[in-house]
Amino acid sequence: FMKKLLFIILTFSTLCANAQYLTTHAKNIDCKEVAGVYYYLPRTTMKIQFTIQETMQHIGPFAEYAQTLLGTKDYISEEKKVVEIKNVSVETMSETDPNAVFFVYNDEKSREQNFNFSFDRNGIISGFGIDNVIDNNNNENIFMYDSAPDIEEVKFIDFIADEEEDEDELEGAPKKLTKEDKARMAVEKITKIRTAYFELISGFQEVNYGSSIVDMQNRLKELEYEYLSLFKGKKSVITYQKTVFITPEKIMLGNETVIAKIIDNEGFASPNVKGGEGVKLSFQTDNLSKYVKEISRDDIENGVFSNKLFYRIPEQVKMKLTFKNKTIFETNMVISQFGNFVLIPMNNYKLVFDSENGSIKSISK
């Protein structure tokens, strides 16, 4: 019995002597009482950039006469804005995870007071037990501003028909042209422009205009377009970019999350606005981390771990964006916070961490 007791005492003493570090969640520490080192694990943030195109349809002032005077049904009959997503780009970045900050300190019985850690610029752990760990995963600070659309005012040709002096026998005053009269005069202008264009390209005038004939043709076409737009209306297009930053959470796995909305006659809007069609983000995973036994949140936040460090095994996912039930973007990516926390021994080991996703890059004795 005495031999067994002596063996237990010696074993316990040896463990105490080797237990140089204690790791706990930072919320458990009063830094005024305990000296140690804080370190973060990273989480993944996504920058999703949308290229938006807005097409505004403007009614022409003589639209009501388009069918009767021009014989066309191809005209704009209502003021309208059509909003489209023309392109999507996605970039992932790493940042410190405020829910994964830990504190490492020396056991009171430890003879050594040595902290040999390496960090990136944000305080994310990049190494232990190795001097001058070079971290190549730092992202440059990115500041993104949504570009404001350059809105160009749409104007119709200033068509002022000369009033014909048609004396009214009763009043002796000139007769004012009605809107229909002006529309008919605009049709006459269109006919004259088309006749002039035909004569120009057919050589009817038998005049050598040289290279300037191309400019004359283009000018006549521009004039025709301007007069036709009085009936058919005009369209104007603006293109701009909107950027959405998303920090995925585990609750989003397997579910669709509305991250923005497209609202008819308005444009790109936040997901909280009523109405409109939602742009939906979803994640699907092969759940590779299911084979790694997860440490409970309660144990992580309240436990004290001897000679061990927390790291993460990130999760590989398929990210997809859909709009009106159509996929507009999809790709594979790694999301750190979708993975599980794992403990790794630190005594007598040299550890290098990936400060972008929180995983182990190398371990050596």
Image (cartoon, rainbow, N blue to C red):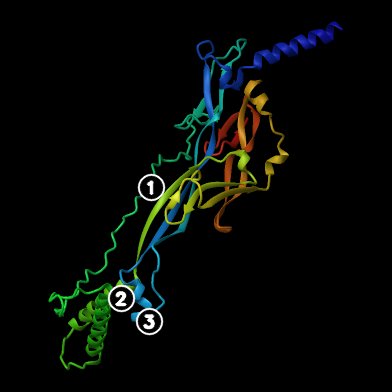
Q: Amino acid at mark 1?
A: Asp
Measuring 68% from the left and 44% from the top, which residue is drawn there?
Answer: 287
Query: Eyeballing the image, is 166 above or below 143?
Result: below
The amino acid on which the numbered mark 2 sits, given as a three-letter code, is: Leu
Please tell me how crowded label 2 is: few (under 14), some (14-19), or many (20+) other residues with Cα within 10 Å.
many
**Left or right of 58, for residue 351:** right
Q: Position of residue 142 (x, y in %)?
A: 40, 42
Q: Is residue 194 visible?
A: yes
Depth order, front residue of 303/216: 216
The residue nearer to you, when weighing 304 against 346, is 304
Mark 2 sits on what residue?
A: 228
Quadrant for the C terminus, please. top right
**Secondary structure type for disc 3:** loop
Mark 2: secondary structure: helix
Q: Which of the marked residues, 2 or 3, is nearer the chain's N terminus? A: 3
Question: Residue extending furthest right?
Answer: 1
Report crowding for label 3: few under 14, some 14 to 19, many 20 or more residues within 10 A (C-alpha).
Answer: few
Q: CA distance from mark 3 to mark 1?
A: 44 Å
For marks 2 and 3, give the CA distance. Answer: 12 Å
Q: Residue at x 15, y 91 (%)?
A: 207
- Residue on which the image places disc 1: 146
How far from the left and from the top, in percent, is residue 208? 16, 90
Residue 314, visible in the rendered structure: no
Give the side of residue 265 with respect to residue 184, left or right: right
Task: Give, as a three-letter code, the residue at label 3.
Answer: Gly
Foreground label between 3 and 1: 3
Of all residues, the one furthest to the top in this rendering is 2
- Numbered label attached to residue 71: 3
* Label 1: which secondary element: loop
